[in-house]
């Protein structure tokens, strides 16, 4: 039997960070495929065409093949997270299970991506593909967070009302992502000029998406007010400040792209911004919790405690 070399907790956390970045970037590269009209550059799956496993004869095929190649690299990163959870010393069962969650998510992404191509980029499938990506990012964020602290229950370091409001905040962030996919499924960038679109009026779904985003911002501001008023940890305060800044920047970008007729470049930035908002929201919520110094991770020469994920409590 092959024995994996042991790795430190610090090294494993770096692996989980690299995996999180890869999982986030694949969302943006997938959007690039759609925005360049290359969604059907490869008409088949898993091969590019009926008689070619790989084909880069055309521009759209090249874009799609690069995206598929990057999907393979993300899969390697996910496998690294799994192997790292087994090789990590001390070994933690919770990290192994969360890393296996990434495997399940990647398999789902690959299969759903193939079905999406076979069904000619049917909008609900494209929307589901993005939602599954958001779930995969959530899994990666939780894994990275848990890798930074000891195993065991977390302790709420903020008022109970802040936790409740934080859950509402995360739920609204998810709603913003979902309504954004509806706008995408209705708008002009479907991945191919002949792809069917959702039977809605773009202005109407964009308005719903905007109202959801405003509700998200209002709840986040209320959450920030509660955090500052109740003397929460500096970590929680810092994270919620960043979250508000990211939301405002993303909102400004969204209105700008809408006014300018949704140019592909700004849409790509907006997709990247949606990932940033989602990750920052999750990290902000996780910042409400602390943990005992059971399995502290050495950072910069000293052992420090980090936050625990509430979803595992």
Image (tube, rainbow, N blue to C red):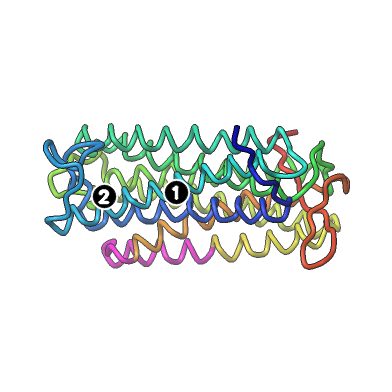
Q: How many marks?
A: 2
Is 14 in the magenta?
Answer: no
Q: Is 120 placed left or right of 98 in the picture?
A: left
| Quarter of the figure with the C terminus | top right
Mark 2: secondary structure = loop
Can you tell which of label 2 and label 1 is closer to the viewer? 1
Q: Which mark is residue 187?
A: 2
Q: Is 92 placed left or right of 119 in the picture?
A: right
For the magenta stretch, what is the residue range? 248-265
Q: Nearer the viewer, residue 13 or 43?
A: 13
- Residue 199 appears in the picture as rendered: no
Residue that appears at 18% across and 39% down = 196
Q: Quadrant of residue 75?
A: top left
Mark 1: secondary structure = helix
Sequence-first disc among 2 and 1: 1
What residue would you read off at disc 1? 74
Give the main secondary structure, helix, strand or loop, of the magenta stretch. helix
């Amino acid at each position: 039997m092959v024995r994996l070399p042991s790795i430190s907790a610090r090294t494993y956390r770096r692996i989980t960070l690299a995996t999180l970045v890869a999982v986030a970037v694949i969302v943006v590269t997938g959007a690039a495929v759609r925005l360049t009209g290359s969604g059907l550059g490869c008409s088949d799956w898993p091969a590019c065409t009926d008689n070619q496993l790989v084909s880069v004869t055309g521009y759209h095929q090249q874009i799609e093949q690069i995206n598929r190649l990057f999907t393979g690299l993300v899969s390697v990163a996910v496998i690294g997270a799994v192997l790292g959870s087994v090789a990590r010393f001390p070994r933690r069962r919770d990290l192994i299970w969360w890393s296996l969650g990434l495997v399940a998510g990647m398999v789902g992404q690959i299969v759903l991506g193939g079905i999406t191509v076979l069904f000619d980029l049917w909008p609900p499938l494209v929307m589901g593909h993005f939602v599954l990506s958001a779930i995969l990012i959530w899994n990666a964020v939780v894994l990275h967070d848990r890798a930074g602290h000891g195993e065991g229950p977390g302790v709420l370091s903020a008022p109970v009302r802040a936790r409740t409001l934080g859950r509402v905040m995360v739920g609204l962030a998810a709603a913003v992502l979902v309504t954004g996919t509806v706008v995408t499924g209705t708008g002009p960038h479907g991945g191919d000029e002949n792809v069917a679109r959702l039977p809605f009026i773009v202005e109407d779904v964009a308005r719903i998406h905007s109202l959801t985003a405003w509700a998200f911002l209002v709840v986040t501001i209320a959450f920030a007010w509660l955090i500052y008023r109740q003397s929460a940890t500096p970590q929680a305060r810092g994270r919620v400040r960043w979250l508000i800044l990211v939301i405002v920047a993303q909102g400004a970008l969204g209105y700008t792209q809408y006014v300018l007729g949704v140019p592909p470049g700004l849409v790509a930035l907006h997709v990247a911004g949606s990932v940033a908002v989602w990750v920052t929201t999750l990290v902000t919520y996780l910042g409400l919790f602390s943990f005992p110094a059971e399995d502290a991770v050495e950072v910069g020469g000293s052992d420090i405690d980090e936050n625990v994920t509430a979803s595992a409590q």
